[in-house]
Amino acid sequence: MRTFTKSYKDYTTYKPHLQADFNKRCGYTDCSDLWFGGVVTFHIDHHKPWKKYPKEPNLKTDYSNLVYSCSYVNILKSDDIGAYIDPCDVDYNDHFERGKSGEILPIKKSKQANYMYKKLKLYLRRYEIIWTLDNLFQKMQKMEVMIAKQTNQKQIKELKILQGELAGLFVKQLQYLGANQ
């Protein structure tokens, strides 16, 4: 949901506001910018490419036309005027779902979702891995809070064992992304 109401002449000035409005996540893949290097590596997508619509001169700086996007998706989308769903205007759950291991799947009856899935390569394993990293990270944070609140030493030991198992899974996913190089 886009909440920022001020106007700027330079659309790049909106980036921190887009990052906040999109909860630090790509508007198209829901991947956290954390795993891509943060706000510096994320792009600002013009949902409706301003270069393709010269009769609509405000598209370049119209906040309602901007999407916080990972670089992979923004580069693939480029100035294509295909059937893209604006992530702020439509409930993505009506067009996409997540598989059991976090993969992005288009709903078969949604032509727009199927177009985006192919054009933006939403089938790439990277989005499944990042979804898994996000979930593991959240569980590890909850585990840390649980350990801090626990007073029973036996339960603390068991929680730390579980925490270690989560950390192992976490590292395995990071290695897949090449983060250890």
Image (spheres, helix red, strand yellow):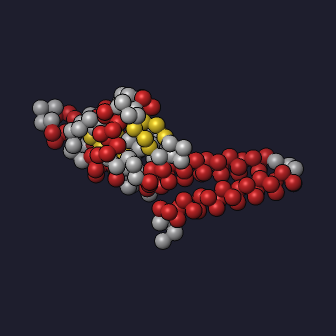
Residue 123 location in percent, x, y? 39, 48
Residue 155 location in percent, x, y? 84, 51
Q: Is residue 86 visible?
A: no
Q: Residue furthest left?
A: 55
Q: How many marks?
A: 0
Nearest the eye: 126 or 160? 126
Q: Is residue 146 visible?
A: yes
Q: Residue at x 48, y 50 (%)?
A: 128
Nearest the eye: 157 or 33? 157
Q: Residue at x 48, y 71 (%)?
A: 181
Nearest the eye: 97 or 138? 97
Left or right of 175, for residue 40: left
Residue 19 sits in which quadrant? top left
Q: Residue furthest front?
A: 108
Relative to 5, say whether 43 is above or below. Answer: below
Left or right of 117, for residue 21: right
Residue 40 sits in which quadrant? bottom left
Residue 47 location in percent, x, y? 28, 38
Q: Which quadrant of the figure contains the N terminus?
A: top left
Q: Residue at x 54, y 59 (%)?
A: 173
Q: Residue at x 28, y 51 (%)?
A: 75
Residue 166 location in percent, x, y? 66, 56
Nearest the eye: 181 or 148? 181
Q: Residue furthest bottom?
A: 181
